[in-house]
Image (tube, rainbow, N blue to C red):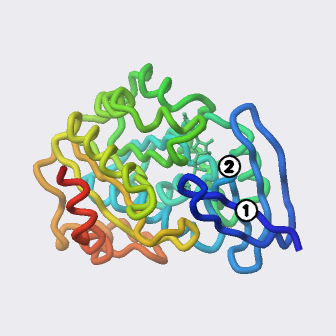
Amino acid sequence: MKWFKEDLYGATITQWLAIDKLIYKGKSKYQKILLFENKSLGRVLALDGIVQTTEKDEFIYHEMIVHVPMMSHPNPRRVLIVGGGDGGAAEEVLKYGSVERVVMVDIDGEVVELAKKYLRKICKRAFEDKRLELIIDDGVKYVANTDEKFDVVIVDSPDPIGPGKVLFTKRFYQSIYRVLDKVGVMSRQAGSTFFQGNELPQAVRLLRQVFPLNDVYLTAVPTYIGGLFSFVLSGKGLKAWPSLKVLEKRFAQAGIKTDYYTPEVHKASFVLPVYVARAIAK
Ligand code: SAM
């Protein structure tokens, strides 16, 4: 039996996943790529030794990084995804009939090609959807230079290591603020609240310098071990987040099918345990 060893949190904790079938192992210009099958998780994508997504639990992460900002916007028509090479976030965004255009910018074309070939259960037909434009480039460069405006921006980045490090800077958030229309919403993942304790407070601190409305929401993704996993939702031109009633109306109107997200889950995910609230209060 072969095993994938995932050293996490400064190599203080290791997760071992059985490689029941190796699908691809290689190195792109930017990162080491590993794709394999595991009997409990289905196909698993790891970049630079870190699990990015798995067929079995991707729906939790992708639905929460996508539907929370989408439902927080009154009429999301133009969406930008930074990162997200596996296509899972794009697939969720394209569920909306209201969406006219999606731009997805991932630095690594090889991840996208592998996802199209081997991760169909995750990306479905997203890459064939005419509303999606795929740009292979650095997300930071793209947001700094584009003149396009978006209603929603989703930052589906890896951890702040390797090519993903630049996606955690104030300059990047300032560019996102600029590319958002008068009313705009951004979501980003901000790591494990327990083991990556600095990542969330750092993200919140920077985002508060750029956006007037920022809040943290949580979920639990089985393969991102460590319990509660965090996201930040930032708003431009909004005074407050929508009420449960408004979310219910928008969700019913959108008519999309989900396996994790509901308006109640949306609202509940903003309830923070003391240690998380305290960490971001500083
Ligand atoms: N859900 C994942 C997680 O939290 O572990 C993130 C998954 S997604 C596959 C991460 C993507 O970000 C990868 O496809 C990677 O190529 C892309 N990426 C890394 N750095 C980037 C950059 N500077 N600009 C755009 N995309 C980047």
Near mark 2 (Cα within 10 A), the count class, few <14, some 14-19 or many ≥20, is some
Mark 1 or 2 closer to N-term?
A: 1
Q: Amino acid at mark 2?
A: Leu
Q: Which residue is mark 1?
A: 5
Residue 31 in the image: state x and y as whole percent.
70, 39
**The CB of the residue at mark 2 lies under 8 Å from ligand 1:** yes
Q: Amino acid at mark 1?
A: Lys
Name the residue located 42 percent from the left edge and 38 percent from the top edge.
168
Q: Tell me if residue 174 comes above or below residue 75 in the rendering.
A: above
Residue 181 in the image: state x and y as whole percent.
27, 35
Number of numbered discs visible in the structure rendering: 2
Q: Tell me if residue 108 comes above or below residue 204 in the rendering.
A: above
Q: Which residue is mark 2?
A: 47
Camera-nearest residue between 132 and 260:
260
Q: Quadrant of ligand 1?
A: top right
Near mark 1 (Cα within 10 A), the count class, few <14, some 14-19 or many ≥20, is some
Residue 204 in the image: state x and y as whole percent.
28, 46
Q: Distance of mark 1 from mark 2, alpha carbons?
A: 12 Å
Camera-nearest residue between 144 and 72:
144
Residue 79 in the image: state x and y as whole percent.
42, 44
